[in-house]
Image: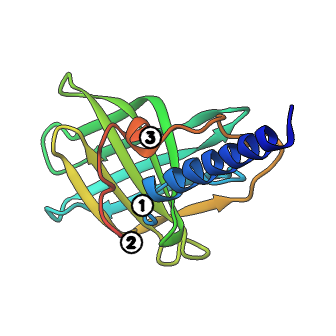
Amino acid sequence: MSRAISKVVSGLMVGAFVAVSLLVLTSVPASSHFVPIPCDFITSGGFVFTDAGKHGNFGAHGGCKNGAFWGHVNYLDHGSAPPYHVDSTQITGYLIDPAFPNARDICGFARTNQGETVRFRVRLVDNGEPGRDDKFGIRLSNGYVVTTRLLEGGNVQLHLPNPSTTAPFPPPDEYTMCGGLEHPGDP
């Protein structure tokens, strides 16, 4: 290859790299939620008062495990008779909010005791031990929401990564993981 052609090819490759890099950098908003790298995991259990002032119990855990998302969410709102029950069937995402480094969102599909299949997004916040100022919130695709609020009892525990907490590669985007559901409110 002649020197002139080599310079043109090199210039095109650099130009293509810069164009792709700019596209990647400008196509993801700075406030986007994303899979933490290295991935970790979170566990929790406790109760909150719902937006309607009723008692809501939850148990939730999630993260990455061996290249996939892992976890389970169980939530019970005692504000109706019978209590409204949400039980996850699939975990489709685990995200960090860069504005709140102690917060993690778990997304997926769930069944309710009203015969619904819904998408959910749970926000868990670990603000210290033992359960001091920890928070929980949930949003469902049917419109149900408990905005992120302080626990009345219980604990949220964010755990450090370990060799088994590997994330899917490449990780899906926020819309794919959570089906377009917004988080239930900032901590």
- Amino acid type of the residue that numbered disc 2 sits on in the rendered structure: Pro
Tell me the quarter of the picture where residue 5 sits: top right
Residue that carries the numbered disc 3 in the rendered image: 73
Numbered mark located on residue 29 in the image: 1
Q: Determine crowd level at label 3: few under 14, some 14-19, many 20+ residues with C-alpha closer than 10 A.
A: many
State left or right for residue 2 relative to residue 18.
Answer: right
Residue 161, position as x, y percentages in the image? 75, 53
Please give the name of the residue rendered at 36% of the width and 52% of the height, measured from the top-left corner: 57
Disc 2 versus disc 1: distance between alpha carbons?
20 Å
Q: Earlier in the sequence, mark 1 or mark 3?
A: 1
Quadrant holding the N terminus: top right
Residue that carries the numbered disc 2 in the rendered image: 187
Classify 47 as above or below 3: below
Please give the name of the residue rendered at 72% of the width and 53% of the height, measured from the top-left corner: 38
In the foreground, 36 or 134? 36
Residue 53, position as x, y percentages in the image? 17, 65
